[in-house]
Amino acid sequence: MGDVFKEQLVKKSASAKDTALRFGIVALVVIVVFICLSVPALQPFMIFIAAAACFGAYILISRLNIEYEYVFTNGELDIDVIYNKTSRKRMFSFTVRDFEIMAHVQDTAHTRDMLNIAETKDCSSGVTGPNTYAFVTPYKGKRLKVIIEPNDMMIKAFSTVLTPRKLFKKL
């Protein structure tokens, strides 16, 4: 049997919280710049502070532009987060065989299996759709629930590793 390699990119949708955060950052920078430019004493130093606040706001706002990349290689699932299409960070690396269960997030038949979870991480677009799944797996000594949006090709790759008792596809 040959190697199995699948990858997928999922862009996180801007939520109301993200929009409010962007607005708050811009409002804070406007206030800081106004205060810095209205203080005549130490004017060069205040201009430096105003410029630093603008640069900091740019960095913070650009980090709100998030994409998730799922890479499935021979039974291993890596989830990376990509900020503003420039910097990447590995969030998780799982062995798919270790998944306790994987089901659609709206699957009411398996909600009991998704209870008593220590932590939940949302690595999806943030919008529940037909391909929004959650899986539970042991991670660092705890049960972790991860929400992802695999496409049909990725789900088919998972089904090569997961048994039908662990993977519940939405019909």
Image: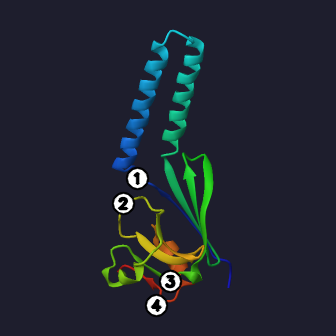
The reply to whether dot 3 and dot 2 touch (C-beta < 8 Å) is no
The reply to whether dot 3 and dot 4 touch (C-beta < 8 Å) is no
Which residue has dot 4 on it? 165
In the rendered image, the residue lying farthest to the left is 108
Residue 134, image x, y percentages = 44, 73
From the image, state whether disc 3 or disc 4 is nearer to you.
Answer: 3
- Using the image as rendered, state which of residue 71 and residue 122 is in the foreground: 122
The reply to whether dot 2 and dot 1 touch (C-beta < 8 Å) is yes
In the rendered image, the residue lying farthest to the right is 2
Q: Earlier in the sequence, mark 1 or mark 3?
A: 1
- For badge 2, the amino acid type reads Val
Residue appearing at x 55%, y 30% in the figure: 55
Q: Residues within 10 Å of mark 3 (few under 14, many from 20)?
A: some
Q: Earlier in the sequence, mark 4 or mark 1?
A: 1
Which residue has dot 3 on it? 100
Q: Residues within 10 Å of mark 2 (few under 14, many from 20)?
A: few
Q: Earlier in the sequence, mark 3 or mark 4?
A: 3
Q: Earlier in the sequence, mark 4 or mark 2?
A: 2
In the rendered image, the residue lying farthest to the front is 41
Residue 13: mark: 1
Q: What is the spatial separation of the Cα atoms under label 4 and label 1, in whole angstroms?
A: 32 Å
Residue appearing at x 54%, y 34% in the figure: 56
- Using the image as rendered, state which of residue 112 and residue 69 is in the foreground: 112
Residue appearing at x 49%, y 18% in the figure: 36
Residue 127: mark: 2
